[in-house]
Amino acid sequence: MVLPESLVEEVIEAKGLSDWSSSALEHLTLTDFIASGAYDRHVRAMRLRYRRRRDQLVAVLAERAPGVRVSGIAAGLHAVLELPEGGEEAALRAEAWQGLALDGISRFRHPQAPPGRDALVVGYGTPTDSAWAGALEALCRALS
């Protein structure tokens, strides 16, 4: 952490009470990773990789599942696939049959909130590069 000088002692004390087993080797490795510029290169490469995956997801769904709209900002590791009304449960069952692990947006809704749109939350950061095409194909099969 990079802290204002006035908070250092308080944070050290709190960390000591809750996290007494941090590995010095991991801290030194991360320090070297950052200082060498490797961390910055890694973040830039991952940002590009995930942007390409999201762009692929949007393009393939536009072609193969035109009733599904992708929403959310074009950053991060997740996209929200807006489904026709009543489509969330059916899509989740189909996803399970395809071997995918997705969440419906209703899982993230407060229990007392009124029903909202049907949607899936798709994480596109998890599949390996070799599994990405197959996962995208399985998603399209489940949505069509």
Image (cartoon, helix red, strand yellow):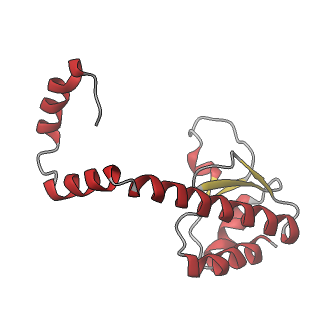
Residue 89, above or below 3: below
Residue 115, above or below 101: above
**Residue 44 visible at all:** yes
**Residue 123 visible at all:** no
Q: Which residue shows up at 60% across the image and 64% down it? A: 49
Whether residue 25 sits left or right of residue 30 in the image: it is left
Residue 119 in the image: x percent, y percent? 71, 54
Residue 46 in the image: x percent, y percent? 53, 60
Q: Which residue shows up at 69% across the image and 45% down it? A: 73
In the rendered image, which quarter is residue 38 located in? bottom left
Q: Quadrant of the C terminus?
A: bottom right
Residue 95 in the image: x percent, y percent? 65, 72
110 or 74, nearer to the observer:
74
Report the number of discs.
0
Residue 114, above or below 29: above
In the rendered image, which quarter is residue 92 located in? bottom right
Whether residue 128 sits left or right of residue 24 in the image: it is right
Q: Quadrant of the N terminus?
A: top left
Whether residue 77 sits left or right of residue 143 in the image: it is left
Q: Which residue shows up at 83% across the image and 56% down it? A: 84
User: Residue extending furthest front?
Assistant: 36
Residue 49, above or below 12: below
In the rendered image, which quarter is residue 78 located in? bottom right
104 or 46, nearer to the observer:
46
Residue 143 in the image: x percent, y percent? 77, 70
10 or 103, nearer to the observer:
10
